[in-house]
Image (cartoon, rainbow, N blue to C red):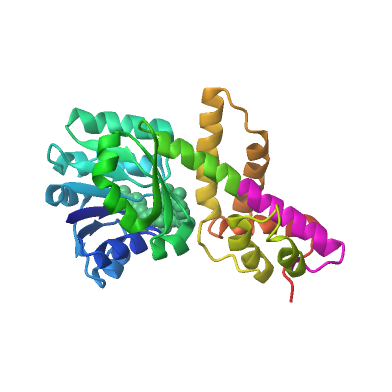
């Protein structure tokens, strides 16, 4: 199948490579030419705009940073809606505000374009393996029609409800991940300051109730002081911002999210916005003047 793919960052590139490996033809676009070249090397076909991608493909996937980027790519000048034929399916796999998904879907449906929101969890390693968790909102028939394509990139794809439900699910995911990393960092610092090697704490507790996928993925990074992204602090700020706004809108206070948001904002102000979100540990390192990493 010929698939259009727009947004070739940390996640988009491996997702394109998995579609190519599965035998699909993939037409790609990104504002950064180097990112296009990196997947053209693997067999993708370069395009010159989002509109041009839409003119060539009946199925388009977007993997962009946030709501404004998706609005520009879909509804803006030289965007998808200028090029897409009626009946085209748009799968937005970016993590954006649920209300923005609704707004974009409305604009799409006015032109006969069918859109679902399908954000992912798992980060770069799972994007490379094709084992991401995909959470989907929108018309169930469209979900079923594209299910096999989603499963080329994911280990699971769950239909969560109407348009925006995928992104609401993703916000819940991001709240849990951020709070979990903060809890791991806080606890490891406690152990370090009290004289117990965090590496031994990790070995001792990872199989117990406190163990988690987040801990398994992030504890080794924290202990090595390796904060190469992965998932950037600035992207997590974006997600928690969307979570807080959504929470305020629906009457669901998020006190713990608000605290972790301020930790992220502190790190952003301290030039750590491009670090992996495991760098929440640095917040505690700055508080105590002690490094968690063990030798
Ligand atoms: P990224 O910043 O690495 O990539 C985004 C890409 O979009 C960039 O290559 C950028 O040039 C491109 N882009 C921006 N504006 C554009 C435009 N107008 N037209 C064309 N291309 C444009 O981000 P990422 O880490 O790949 O994340 C993408 C989405 O996936 C985000 O919503 C993020 O929250 C989500 N996500 C990321 C991870 C992760 O671990 N990195 C995990 C799960 C979900």
**What residue is rendered at 31% in x and 58% in y?**
152
- Viewer-side residue, 48 vs 227: 227
| Highlighted magenta segment, given as a residue range | 178-198
Q: Quadrant of residue 126?
A: bottom left
Residue 53 in sight from this viewpoint? yes
Where in the figure is residue 95, as x and y percent of width and height? 43, 44
The x, y position of residue 242, in whole percent, is 50, 37
Q: Quadrant of residue 8?
A: bottom left
Q: Residue at x 38, y 59 (%)?
A: 9
Q: Quadrant of the C terminus?
A: bottom right
Q: What percent of the width, then of the height, locates residue 189?
A: 78, 59
Is residue 188 highlighted in magenta?
A: yes
Quadrant (top left, top right, bottom left, bottom right) of the N terminus: bottom left
Q: Specify the principal SS of the magenta part.
A: helix
Is residue 8 positioned above or below 220 on the image?
above
Does 201 sit left or right of 26 as displayed? right
Q: Can residue 53 be found in the magenta stretch?
A: no
């Amino acid at each position: 199948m010929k698939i259009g793919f727009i947004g070739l960052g940390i996640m988009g590139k491996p997702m394109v490579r998995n579609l190519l490996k599965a035998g699909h033809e993939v037409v790609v676009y990104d504002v950064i030419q180097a990112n296009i070249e990196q997947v053209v090397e693997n067999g993708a076909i370069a395009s010159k705009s989002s509109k041009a991608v839409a003119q060539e493909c009946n199925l388009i996937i977007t993997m962009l940073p946030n709501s404004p980027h998706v609005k520009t790519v879909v509804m803006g000048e030289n965007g998808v809606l200028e090029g897409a034929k009626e009946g085209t399916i748009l799968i937005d796999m970016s993590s954006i505000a649920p209300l923005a998904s609704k707004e974009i879907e409305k604009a799409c449906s006015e032109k006969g374009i069918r859109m679902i929101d399908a954000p992912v969890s798992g980060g770069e390693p799972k994007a490379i393996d094709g084992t991401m968790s995909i959470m989907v909102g929108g018309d169930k028939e469209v979900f079923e029609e594209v299910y096999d394509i989603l499963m080329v990139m994911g280990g699971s794809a769950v239909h969560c409800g109407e348009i925006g439900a995928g992104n609401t699910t993703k916000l819940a995911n991001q709240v849990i991940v951020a709070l979990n990393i903060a809890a791991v960092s806080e606890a490891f610092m406690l152990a370090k300051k009290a004289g117990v090697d965090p590496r031994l704490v990790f070995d001792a507790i990872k199989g117990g109730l406190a163990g988690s996928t987040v801990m398994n993925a992030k504890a080794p990074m924290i202990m090595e002081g390796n904060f190469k992204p992965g998932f950037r602090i600035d992207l997590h700020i974006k997600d928690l911002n969307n979570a807080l706004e959504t929470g305020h809108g629906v009457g669901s206070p998020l006190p713990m999210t608000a605290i972790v948001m301020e930790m992220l904002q502190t790190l952003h102000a301290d030039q750590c916005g491009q670090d992996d979100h495991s760098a929440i540990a640095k917040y505690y390192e700055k508080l105590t003047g002690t490094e968690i990493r063990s030798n």
